[in-house]
Image (cartoon, coloured by chain):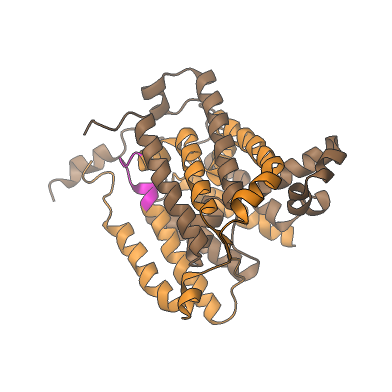
Chain colours: A brown, B orange
């Protein structure tokens, strides 16, 4: 039991990074949100709403172009944002905003620590790569028909074969990319 | 009423993501680098609870299931693409929104990049559909469905396995 003391102190060198909830409480919370959603409406999903917002915005500016795309007109049905699905996704930043205020974790830091260590503290570089990453992320999510929420949490919970394959491929590629990007290969 | 329900459920989801560190770039990046498995443990717990809860609801006929179509190799290729983006930004489409709500400008950049990526996909869809999405199309296949057994038969052992793994994987405070 004498190792309890140092373990406690090495756990969170930076107290602003250490999460409030432990992994099991967080996992339980997400699982419960999914169960309530499945009982009352449908499984949770996020990435489709990126297309819906695209469609509605494009329909405002260039209605003809938006109407031409069968994909947009089908997914952003009726060109409206007042749907359960969109409001669920709208709730995510709202909930995170409120809980970060309540726990005094709201912060406008632009470059995260791991990124600074590897690539330096230049905000421009981080923002550009963050944008490119987001582009690739949603392209892949739409191609696969879901993201971490729709495929990994909802889909795997329903034992969907498609979601298991998507999630396995996602993890393999994300781990290989992250370890390459942060220079972990070769060093132990 | 349904809009309010969506907003409340979404807000609960966003708050849990934020409070448990799932929207933290540091936590996600270190999980993918296999240096700190907190987020992996969290996801396994969520799936374990989800598997049990969803299939228990289904047993009583209370579950509104929505199973996604399987298309091979399209879904695997999509997962590989998604993973690259995930590693580069350190957020996924949902956690980027949560981190944006926490005030992080780089998460906003990911959301805008995502909106652009989804738009480009929408206009490439007619070409991609014939090539990769309708190719190898099997429809909404589930594991228990293809074995012809009730979902709970597989959900109980698999859910228990996920939860067991979540507890067994090392804590960051443990072996480094």
Which residue range is magenta in the image? B33-40
Residue at (38%, 41%) from the top-left corner?
A175
Q: Image quadrant for the N terminus of chain B? A: bottom right
Pick the residue in front: A179 or B171. Answer: A179
Main secondary structure found in the magenta portion: loop
Residue at the right extreme of this rendering: A64
Residue at (43%, 57%) from the top-left corner?
A27
A150 relative position to B125: left or right: left
Residue at the left extreme of this rendering: A2
Tell whether position B36 is magenta.
yes
- In which quadrant of the rendered view does residue B97 lie? top right
User: In this orientation, does residue A104 appear?
Assistant: no
In the rendered view, tell whether residue B7 sits above or below residue B64.
Answer: above
Residue A132 in picture, x, y percent from top left: 56, 30
Residue at (45%, 77%) from the top-left corner?
B147
B8 relative position to B175: left or right: right
Q: Looking at the image, how many numbered discs can be counted on the residues?
A: 0
User: In this orientation, does residue B32 appear?
Assistant: yes
Tell whether position B174 is magenta.
no
Pick the residue in front: B11 or B65. Answer: B65
In the rendered view, tell whether residue B161 sits above or below residue B31.
Answer: below
Residue A169 in picture, x, y percent from top left: 44, 50
- In which quadrant of the rendered view does residue B52 lie? bottom left
B125 relative position to A154: left or right: right
Residue A162 in picture, x, y percent from top left: 51, 60
Residue B82 in picture, x, y percent from top left: 51, 43
Residue at (57%, 47%) from the top-left corner?
A141
């Amino acid at each position: 039991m004498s190792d309890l003391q140092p373990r406690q102190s090495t756990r969170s060198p930076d107290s602003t990074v250490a999460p409030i909830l432990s992994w099991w409480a967080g996992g339980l919370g997400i699982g419960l949100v999914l169960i309530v959603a499945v009982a009352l409406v449908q499984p949770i999903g996020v990435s489709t709403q990126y297309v819906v917002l695209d469609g509605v915005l494009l329909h405002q500016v260039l209605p003809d172009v938006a109407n031409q795309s069968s994909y947009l007109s089908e997914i952003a049905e009726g060109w409206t944002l007042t749907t359960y699905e969109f409001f669920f996704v709208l709730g995510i930043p709202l909930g995170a905003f409120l809980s970060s205020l309540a726990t005094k974790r709201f912060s406008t830091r632009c470059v995260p620590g791991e990124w600074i260590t590897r690539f330096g503290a230049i905000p421009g570089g981080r923002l550009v790569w963050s944008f490119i990453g987001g582009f690739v992320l949603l392209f892949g999510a739409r191609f696969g028909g879901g993201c971490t929420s729709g495929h990994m949490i909802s889909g795997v919970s329903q034992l969907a074969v498609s979601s298991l394959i998507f999630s396995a491929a996602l993890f393999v590629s994300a781990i290989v990319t992250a370890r390459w990007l942060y220079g972990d290969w070769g060093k132990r | 009423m349904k809009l309010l329900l969506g907003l409340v459920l979404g807000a609960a989801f966003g708050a849990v993501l934020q409070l448990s560190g799932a929207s933290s770039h540091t936590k996600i990046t270190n999980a993918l680098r296999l240096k700190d498995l907190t987020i992996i443990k969290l996801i396994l717990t969520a799936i374990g609870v989800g598997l049990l809860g969803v299939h228990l609801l289904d047993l009583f006929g209370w579950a509104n299931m929505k199973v996604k179509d399987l298309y091979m190799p399209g879904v695997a290729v999509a997962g590989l693409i998604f993973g690259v983006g995930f590693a580069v930004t350190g957020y996924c489409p949902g956690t980027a929104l949560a981190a944006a709500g926490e005030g992080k400008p780089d998460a906003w950049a990911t959301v805008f990049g995502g909106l652009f990526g989804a738009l480009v996909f929408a206009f490439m869809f007619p070409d991609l559909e014939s090539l990769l999405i309708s190719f190898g199309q099997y429809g909404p296949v589930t594991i228990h469905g293809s074995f012809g057994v009730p979902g709970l038969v597989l959900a109980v052992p698999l859910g228990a396995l996920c939860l067991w793994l979540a507890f067994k994987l090392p804590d960051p405070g443990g072996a480094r």
